[in-house]
């Protein structure tokens, strides 16, 4: 289809220059309403609508993307049209975010790259400019797990918190039991809170627990149990140690007969929120020297212990990771001292037999 393009100027030469520039900037029209003249604010709305309609990404993740756009990206870039974007402009924006927070920089780059990817697919841009910006460098921190002495401190802090006088109903043993089950399984906190009595098998020869759900909280939807955990690899059955069996048997004695009831319900019998449990733990650990311990630390502790006693592959399976590489890099603490091979290295100090050249004692 032939289209006429016009431009104006104060002189004929100026009009011709304006026309040539207009032809350079011109993009073919698209069917989705995304063009080179679309603003970043409008592109963000298109992208979020696409994600929600596609339904491939968790609603909570889409909501987080929307929050990052509203608070970080759009206040500065929202008024720009796609044709006004340059790699240098985006790079300066992202590098400036690094001085505030590496996490904020990383999240902004993720949403910007995905948004511009949509613009490329709709022919509003020819390349994704974000992919040419500086890499996000995160400071690597070594995984830190709990020692047995640390665990003694954790349990003492839990007992002291439960016994503390405070207004309102007396604190329950829920939090201590939740932490024990995290230590017994290596499960995520949302996975533990999503365990139903139907998922527990205490009468088998090898008592076990099947992890096949997680807890989600969404605005307008409330807190609910999602019938699948983080990934396909996260669905797993783990054999329970003795201390976890004791916790579950005690709780089952006072539990309702409904197999779909939560093992760790609220006082009203509903699903507990992850944020509420995390907030309670922050109250417990306050002024105890355990401020560095998060619910994820219990998961790292399980991974480290299994890797030391068995291997990283087994630790990865216990945690529900898709690859042992993830477990090694982010979950297993390095030992304070390398493996004791001093007796092997002692051979290097021996004198060779003059006749054979072999190390004496071989």
Image (cartoon, helix red, strand yellow):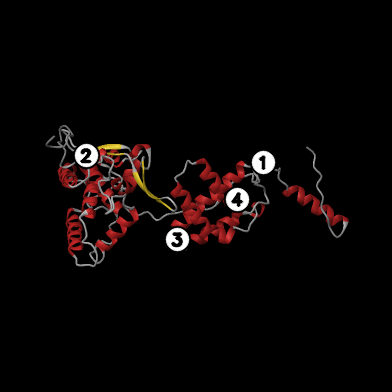
- Tag 2 near tag 1, CB within 8 Å: no
**What element does badge 2 sit on?**
loop
Which one is in front in this view, the residue at disc 2 or the one at disc 1? Answer: 1
Tell me which residue sits at (22%, 60%) in the image.
171
The 10 Å Cα crowd at callout 1, few under 14, some 14 to 19, many 20 or more, is: few
Marker count (numbered): 4
The 10 Å Cα crowd at callout 2, few under 14, some 14 to 19, many 20 or more, is: few
Q: Is residue 95 left or right of residue 249?
A: right
Q: Quadrant of residue 303?
A: top left
Residue 224 x %, y %: 37, 47
Q: In the displayed image of the protein, which residue is found farthest to the left?
A: 361
Residue under pointer 4? 43
Res 310 label: 2
Residue under pointer 1? 31
Residue under pointer 3? 101
Query: How much space separates mark 3 and mark 2, taking CA atoms?
Result: 38 Å
**What element does badge 3 sit on?**
loop
**What element does badge 4 sit on?**
helix
Instruction: Name the foreground residue: 334 vs 168.
Output: 168
């Amino acid at each position: 289809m032939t289209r006429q393009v016009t431009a104006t100027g104060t002189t004929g030469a100026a009009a011709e220059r304006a026309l040539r520039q207009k032809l350079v900037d011109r993009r073919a029209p698209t069917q989705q309403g995304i063009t080179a003249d679309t603003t970043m604010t409008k592109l963000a709305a298109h992208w979020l609508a696409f994600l929600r309609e596609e339904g491939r990404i968790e609603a909570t993740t889409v909501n987080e993307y929307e929050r990052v756009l509203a608070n970080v990206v759009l206040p500065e870039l929202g008024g720009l049209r796609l044709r006004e974007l340059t790699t240098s402009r985006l790079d300066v924006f992202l590098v400036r975010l690094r001085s505030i927070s590496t996490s904020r920089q990383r999240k902004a780059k993720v949403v910007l790259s995905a948004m511009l990817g949509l613009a490329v697919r709709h022919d509003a841009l020819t390349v994704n400019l974000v992919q040419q910006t500086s890499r996000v460098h995160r400071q690597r921190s070594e995984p830190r797990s709990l020692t047995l002495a640390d665990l003694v401190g954790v349990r003492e802090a839990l007992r002291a918190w439960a016994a503390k006088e405070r207004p309102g109903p007396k604190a329950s043993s829920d939090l201590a039991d939740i932490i024990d089950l995290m230590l017994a399984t290596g499960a995520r906190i949302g996975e533990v809170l999503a365990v139903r009595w139907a998922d527990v098998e205490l009468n088998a020869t090898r008592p076990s627990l099947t992890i096949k759900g997680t807890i989600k909280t969404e605005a307008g939807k409330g807190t609910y149990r999602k019938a699948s955990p983080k990934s396909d690899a996260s669905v797993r059955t783990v054999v329970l140690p003795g201390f976890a069996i004791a916790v579950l048997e005690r709780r089952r004695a006072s539990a309702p007969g409904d197999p779909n009831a939560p093992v760790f319900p609220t006082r009203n019998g509903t699903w507990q929120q992850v944020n509420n449990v995390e907030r309670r733990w922050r109250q417990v650990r306050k002024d105890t020297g355990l401020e560095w311990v998060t619910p994820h630390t219990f998961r790292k502790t399980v991974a480290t212990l299994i890797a030391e006693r068995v291997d990283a592959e087994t630790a990865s399976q216990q945690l529900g990771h898709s690859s042992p590489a993830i477990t090694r890099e982010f979950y297993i603490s390095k030992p304070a001292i390398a493996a004791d091979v001093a007796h092997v290295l002692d051979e290097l100090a021996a004198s060779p037999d003059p006749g054979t050249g072999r190390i004496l004692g071989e």
